Amino acid sequence: MDVRLFKPSLGESELKNVREAFERSWVGFGGQVQRFEEAWSAHLGGANSLALNSGTAALQLAVQAFGFEPGSKVMVPAITFAATAMAAINNRLVPVFVDVDERTASLSVQDMERKYSPDVVAVIPVHYAGHPADMEAIVDFARSKGMKVIEDCAHTPGSRYGDKPLGLWGDFGCFSFEEKKCLTTGDGGMLCATDSDLLERVRPARWLGIDKDVWHRFSKERERKAESGEVPPWYYEVTMPGHKFNMNDLAATIGLAQLERLPAMNRRRSEIVKRYLEGIGNTNGMEPLIPFEPERYTYQIFGLRVDRRDELIAALNRQGISSGVHYMPLGRHPFFREWASPCPVADRIWTSFVTLPLHPDLTDAEVDRVLEAVSLMLVPA
Ligand SMILES: *Cc1c(COP(=O)(O)O)cnc(C)c1O
């Protein structure tokens, strides 16, 4: 494929940081991780952040933080990546697939209200493509029922929505730095919360339940004991069930370089989305995937809704342009079938979804090539 669907934008500044990590000979869990956490918290403003090795890990820890009764239910939108539902299942909870809003393809508040039962303990809205889910209504409803709100921010680099960034509307915001996302560390993720106590509750779980960080940084009494020699310097305790979910210095240092370039990368994404929208105009037989607002929000995904979706994908393919489908409703996957529930809107709209190339290094000429290929296919033969 000569026009890639997603491509990380990596350059000299990332390479320079990696070289410095090599020179320090420190590529594991170290000081760069903390630096990246602090920089990301400042980027969002008013956040506390825990750097992890994936967005999936962030979702998993967010759910774990509340210690829900096994078998309780967690609402997730029908149209999302598998990771959103796995966060519930891997915590021995039951996913409830909620239908999506016809226009934004994010969680439908109406269906959330319809499918609510007293054993629903949390909801994980996804800001699909980077467009905000209806957070006012979702948070209002969730609070009225005592539910926790975990935002899946994998498609957004923290665009502002109303008076705060996406990721700080709920109890936790979970970001992904996987290679296709708006900011990449290869693989990586960030768990964010305004409430620092909530974040501290899961901190040990990112590293096998070992509270070495906590030991030294958060307890004066323990720090005193360590310094006075009452406990030896090698001493640590496992205090809770945990995972190997920490970010490493190599990833974090790439993230620090990416974060500096993020405003420019976001601007380029918005320019490309605008160019696509202008190019599509009012062409019959297709419309934008969602109501894109590139002046306000950064998008990880651009796409269309077209009647002959699979034909378009084949035509693009023949011209070396890669495309995709985000996503087939979760209930249609063999593993998730047992939790399937009626999601008529998702079932109807996803068959028209096609994702087109979008990444900061995409050139105007490439965007025009994609637009031409799309319009050619739509002219009746
Ligand atoms: C990418 C993605 C994730 C998971 O992120 P990873 O960093 O790949 O684990 C979760 N949810 C959605 C919607 C995603 O697109």
Image: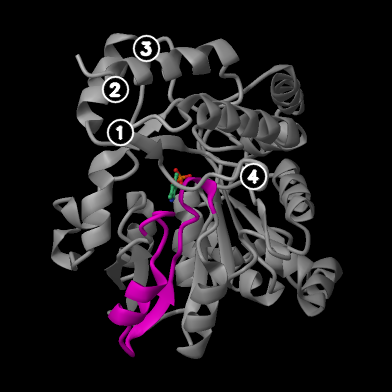
Q: Would residue 104 be counted in the magenta stretch?
A: yes
- Mark 4 to mark 1 CA distance (whole Å): 51 Å
Label 2 – label 1 distance at C-alpha? 7 Å
Which quadrant would residue 97 be assigned to in this image?
bottom left
Cα distance, mark 3 to mark 4?
36 Å
Residue 320 against residue 261 in the figure, above or below = above
| Amino acid residing under circle 3 | Met
Q: Position of residue 104 (x, y in %)?
A: 44, 54
The residue pinned by badge 3 equals: 1
What amino acid does circle 1 point to? Gly
- x 46%, y 57%: residue: 126
Q: Tell me where residue 180 appears, x and y as whole percent.
A: 49, 33
Marked residue nearer the N-terminal end (4 or 1): 4
Q: Which mark is residue 285?
A: 1
Residue displayed at 66% across by 51% down: 159
In the structure shown, which secondary structural element does the residue marked by tag 3 occupy?
loop
